[in-house]
Amino acid sequence: MAIRMVPGTTGMKWVWGVALVALVLGGLHIGFNTNVFGADRLCGGWLKSSDVEDVLDGSGRLSASGTDTVCTVKRSGLLVGGESTVTVRVAAEPAKYPFAMGEWAASSTLRLFTGPVAGGADGRGGWAVLPSGCRVPQGVPSDGTDAKVAVVASVSGGAADEGALARLLTAAAESTAADAGCQTKGSRAELARPRTSSAGFAQVCDLPGFTIPAVTGQGGRATRAGFTGELGKAWICDLAFADDQHGPYARFAAVRDPLLSQGLPAAGATRLDCPGGPVFVTVDDNAYPWDPAERKAAGLLPAKELLTRFTAVVTGALHCSPPASPHT
């Protein structure tokens, strides 16, 4: 004989109990593992919550501490591994930034972007530079009147989405510009993603015609090459030994974008007059910790020769006029 459920019986109470538990659990999930009903803007209105959510890995609510020039946002929830943090700050950088010798903030790991502000971002962080003429906002430490205003981000507790971080940096920099007495115009454009090269020294960083003698590290370590961007806009290449924690032993850059290149003249880069505007080329080999004898044994050419070869290749590739002197 079939059993018919009658309203008010134990079975109906069980159904309502399950529904109530599901409702409570759903509410807890929304309350602790998402940012629903959270503030639309953070850090005194400087950052948009939606931009931060796109950047941070994991789940959870957003909590912010700081000001409109330095702010840390944490995303944390009840789920294991659901905590990550992004810190965004306004910085007064030297005029050579991001290409100060031995201290490049630009690298082949970055997804470069141009537009109203320009910079680069990867899974660990990034930076964006404002146009020259922007004043250093009040409260930001600065040691000179020619300082360059930049917005710098660092991420911990997970890998950031580089495109989302570029959007966050751009929005934060545009907001900063209003307080820095300058304007930003245009739309953001991302350059080509970072790549690796397997061509070796016969075609360094996959750049046709760019050759140097083979370089070998201690223990026969081979070189790995990484590069990013586009040669006619902004292009960066790093050469490093495989499995080496010391970073690149040589770095190359060719930059046309006005914002990304605005620090290169101060850094002693070579200017090329090219169709479509000047291009600045530079080489940095000052960061790797080896002495002259170790460098010579590895086979790396002197910096002047590296720059000469690189400049000649870029000059031909972009149909530029040869430079009058190494640093003009």
Image (spheres, helix red, strand yellow):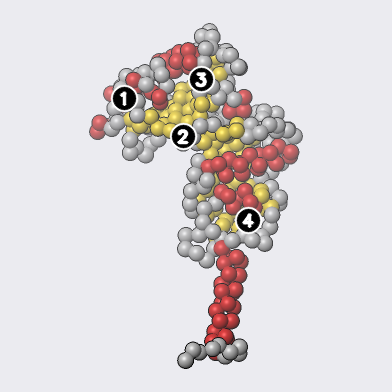
Q: Position of residue 261 (x, y in %)?
A: 58, 25
Numbered mark located on residue 194 in the image: 2
For the point 56% across and 81% down, the residue is 15
Q: Looking at the image, is mark 2 or mark 4 earlier in the sequence? A: 4
Q: Is residue 9 above or below residue 326?
A: below
Circle 1 packing at 10 Å, graded few (<14), some (14-19), many (20+), is many
Q: Report crowding for label 3: few under 14, some 14 to 19, many 20 or more residues within 10 A (C-alpha).
A: many
Observer able to see residue 66: no
Mark count: 4
Cα distance, mark 4 to mark 3?
41 Å
Question: Residue, x 54% and y 19% (percent of image)?
Answer: 280
Q: Could you tell which of marks 3 and 1 lies nearer the N-terminus?
A: 1
Residue 4, numbered circle? none
Give percent across and percent down for residue 17: 57, 82
* Image point (33%, 38%), residue name: 243
Q: Please, is residue 264 above or below residue 52 in the view?
A: above
Whichever of callouts 4 and 3 sits on the residue coming sooner in the sequence is: 4
